[in-house]
Structure formats: structure tokens, C-alpha cells
Image: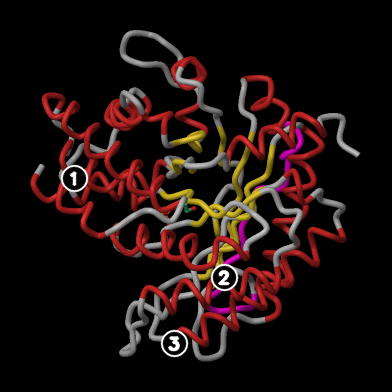
């Protein structure tokens, strides 16, 4: 049993406290640069620092966000005034988290499939991050739907890595966010997504059990059960909420500390509406808190508005806070699309 049991339980509960979610801002430099390049923002360390400072110094952020997930570059950075980002986060009453995987790489022998790397040396990296002040971690596995994929090899390899990562995190005092993302890319139906998500979650919990991971000291970060972006038959908000919750109820032990969804390329409005419907329609059936751990669905309006211009920081922060607030409302089933009008007017 981990020496950190009580601390891990407390951290996990705080991460999904009522009305709060997690802010993913752990894009690798490569992903962050790609998003910058689309908006003509220079892909430099200086601009990545400025953008992460914009996010972390947003006034009032901690009202809706329990903690941000950082990237290795970011956790070591300071504000332009020289205050460590970790101090900014602690002073705001938030909990810092850290992405510890090293990315999804091609799975040998399985065209079109990925396996996430990063287990080598992970115990030492966890110890360093804990010592710096991080209290939770994230590892993202990627599962692609196609006519003949995912393979068992892909599901098992990714689930095994997630479980070994989670066990190492708990040994070292970090709450693991276990993220098996079934991608939204493709023309698959809602039903097809349900079956793939079912198989993936089943294997993830099989492997977590085998590796002795304590469910009450971890957070599951799943994708929603939703038709592929290119599927001709899109689903209603209620259908996505029902399919997603039924798949979770089938596979996720009641003792898991919380569910915090990724947005996965859904629109901002969809991400909020689906989360809200899950809570308003099915919240009473769920044994775990159901909240968000979004990146794009919180950050995008702020990034678009800022676009690298220092004079736009205040307004960009307002847009970030608004999305955090809407998703906080969604986490208690109280988001309504009428709220978007405020954003449209701004
Ligand atoms: P999105 O919400 O943009 O999918 O990102 C969440 C995340 O952390 C992916 O690993």
C-alpha cells in the first residue's frame, strides 16, 4: 500500500470537488506550436511562457478549476515578474498536475495504431515532480476506430502501460489521471464507439486491478461515447449522454474517485452540453462525480483572441474564465446553451 494513501485520497477528491474540473494545459511543445502556427503566433519558448502565464494568472480561475495539468517545460517556468508558476497555482488554491507520458508512438506491427510511451525512468521523474510540488499526473492513451481497428494488441498494450503508470504514480504520491482516449476521428456510429469504449474501459480496469491500483486514489479521464466526426448520423445531446453513462456504469468501479472527461475535438458548446446532460439526466445514478478535464473546449476562445498580442491578455482571460464557468455549471447539470449568448455578445 502506498505511504501516501490519505494524501492521495484527499487530492483525488479535491480534483473533482463539486462545481470544479481540471484544466488541461499540458500540450507538448510540438502540439502547442502547431496551435500557435495556425494563428500566426511565433512558435517559441517565449510565447509559450506568455500564453501559459495568461492562463494561470486569470483572476478567479480557482473558483471553477481544481488544478491545471502542466507540461514539463511549464512546470519549471516563472511569470515575467519572476514568480514560479507553481507558486501562482498554490497561491490561487489550485493543485498542480503534470503530464508524464512521452507521447503516442506507432504500435509496431499494427498499421494506424498507437501505443503511449514513457515508462522508462518514470519512477525517478515522478519523485522529482512530487518534490517540486505536483500532486497529480496524466497519461494519455490513444485508440483509433477504423473498419478493422482497434486491435486487441492496441487495447492491451495501452491498458497495460496505463496501469503500470498509475501504480508508479500512487507509489510516489501522485494521483494518476488514467486517460484512454477513443478518438472522434472517423465515420463510425455511436454504437460502434460504444463497443470500442466498452472494450477499452474493460481492459483498462482489468489491468489496473492486476497492477494493484487503488481506485479511490485515481481519476478516470475518458472520451465521450459519440459518433465519429464524419458519421452521417450525428446523435442528440441526450443520446450521447445516455450512451456514455451506460458504458461507464458497466465498466467503472463505484470506488473510482471521479470521472473527468476530455473534450476530444468536440465543439465548445457540445462539450458543455453533453457534460451537463450527463449530470442533469443521470447524475443520481452515478456513484462518482462526473466533471471535465478539457483543454481545447476551455482554452480555444482565449487563444484565438490573444493570438500573441500582449494588449489582449485581459480580454482573453475573461474568455477563458467564461468557458471555465460554463463547464463548472455543466458539472452540476446547470449549463444551458442560452449562456452562450453572453460569449457571443462579448
Ligand atoms: P481536449 O479537451 O482538447 O481533448 O484535451 C484534453 C486532454 O488533456 C487530452 O489529453
* 62 lies left or right of 192: left
Callout 2: few (<14), some (14-19), or many (20+) C-alpha neighbours within 10 Å? many
Q: Residues within 10 Å of mark 3 (few under 14, many from 20)?
A: some
Choose the circle earlier in sequence order: 2 or 1: 2
* Mark 1 C-beta to ligand 1 under 8 Å: no
Is 202 situated above or below 324?
below
Q: Earlier in the sequence, mark 3 or mark 2?
A: 3
Residue sticking out furthest to the left: 345
Q: Which residue is mark 3?
A: 189
Asked whether residue 160 is in view, the answer is yes
Q: CA distance from mark 3 to mark 2?
A: 17 Å
- Frontmost of labels 3 and 2 is 2
Q: Is residue 105 visible?
A: no
What residue is disc 2 on?
Answer: 245
Q: Quadrant of residue 226?
A: bottom left
Q: Position of residue 345 (x, y in %)?
A: 8, 47
The furthest residue to the right: 1
Helix or strand or loop: what does disc 2 sit on? Answer: helix
Along the polypeptide, which appears first: circle 1 or circle 3? 3
C-alpha gap between disc 2 and disc 1 = 32 Å
Q: At 33% from the left edge and 83% from the top edge, which residue is drawn?
A: 234
Q: Which range of residues does the magenta coloring cover?
A: 109-124
Question: Residue 304: which disc?
Answer: 1
Quarter of the image with the C terminus is top left
Residue 269 sits in quarter = bottom left
Q: Does residue 247 sit above or below 41 in this rendering?
A: below
Name the spot of residue 91 as percent of width and height, x first. 48, 15
Quadrant including the N terminus:
top right
**Going by the image, does 149 lie left or right of 89?**
right
Q: CA distance from mark 1 to mark 3?
A: 31 Å
Q: Is residue 101 above or below residue 141?
A: above
Residue 250 painted magenta:
no
Amino acid at each position: 500500500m502506498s505511504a501516501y494513501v490519505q494524501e492521495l485520497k484527499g487530492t483525488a477528491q479535491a480534483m473533482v470537488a463539486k462545481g470544479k474540473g481540471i484544466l488541461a494545459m499540458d500540450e507538448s511543445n510540438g502540439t502547442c506550436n502547431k496551435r500557435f502556427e495556425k494563428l500566426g503566433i511565433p512558435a517559441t519558448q517565449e510565447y509559450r511562457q506568455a500564453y501559459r502565464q495568461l492562463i494561470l494568472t486569470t483572476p478567479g480561475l480557482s473558483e471553477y478549476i481544481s488544478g491545471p495539468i502542466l507540461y514539463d517545460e511549464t512546470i519549471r517556468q516563472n511569470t515575467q515578474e519572476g514568480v514560479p508558476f507553481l507558486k501562482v497555482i498554490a497561491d490561487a488554491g489550485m493543485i498542480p498536475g503534470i503530464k508524464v507520458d512521452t507521447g503516442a508512438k506507432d504500435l509496431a506491427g499494427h498499421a494506424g495504431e498507437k501505443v503511449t510511451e514513457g515508462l522508462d525512468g518514470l519512477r525517478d521523474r515522478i519523485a522529482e515532480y512530487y518534490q517540486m510540488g505536483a500532486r497529480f499526473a496524466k497519461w494519455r492513451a490513444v485508440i483509433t476506430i477504423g473498419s478493422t481497428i482497434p486491435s486487441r494488441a492496441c487495447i492491451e498494450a495501452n491498458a497495460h502501460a496505463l496501469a503500470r503508470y498509475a501504480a508508479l504514480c500512487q507509489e510516489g504520491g501522485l494521483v494518476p489521471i488514467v486517460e484512454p482516449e477513443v478518438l472522434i476521428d472517423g465515420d463510425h456510429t455511436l454504437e460502434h464507439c460504444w463497443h470500442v469504449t466498452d472494450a477499452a474501459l474493460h481492459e483498462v480496469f482489468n489491468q489496473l486491478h492486476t497492477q494493484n491500483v487503488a481506485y479511490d486514489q485515481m481519476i478516470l479521464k475518458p472520451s465521450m461515447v459519440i459518433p465519429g466526426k464524419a458519421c452521417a448520423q450525428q446523435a442528440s445531446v441526450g443520446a450521447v449522454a445516455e450512451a456514455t453513462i451506460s458504458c461507464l456504469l458497466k465498466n467503472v468501479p463505484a470506488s473510482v474517485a471521479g470521472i473527468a472527461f476530455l473534450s476530444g475535438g468536440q465543439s465548445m458548446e457540445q462539450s458543455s452540453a453533453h457534460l451537463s446532460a450527463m449530470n442533469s439526466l443521470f447524475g443520481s445514478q452515478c456513484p462518482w462525480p462526473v466533471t471535465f478535464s478539457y483543454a481545447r473546449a476551455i482554452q480555444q476562445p482565449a487563444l484565438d483572441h490573444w493570438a500573441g498580442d500582449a494588449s489582449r491578455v485581459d480580454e482573453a482571460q475573461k474568455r477563458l474564465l467564461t468557458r471555465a464557468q460554463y463547464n463548472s455549471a455543466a458539472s452540476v447539470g446547470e449549463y444551458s446553451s442560452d449562456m452562450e449568448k453572453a460569449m457571443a455578445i462579448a
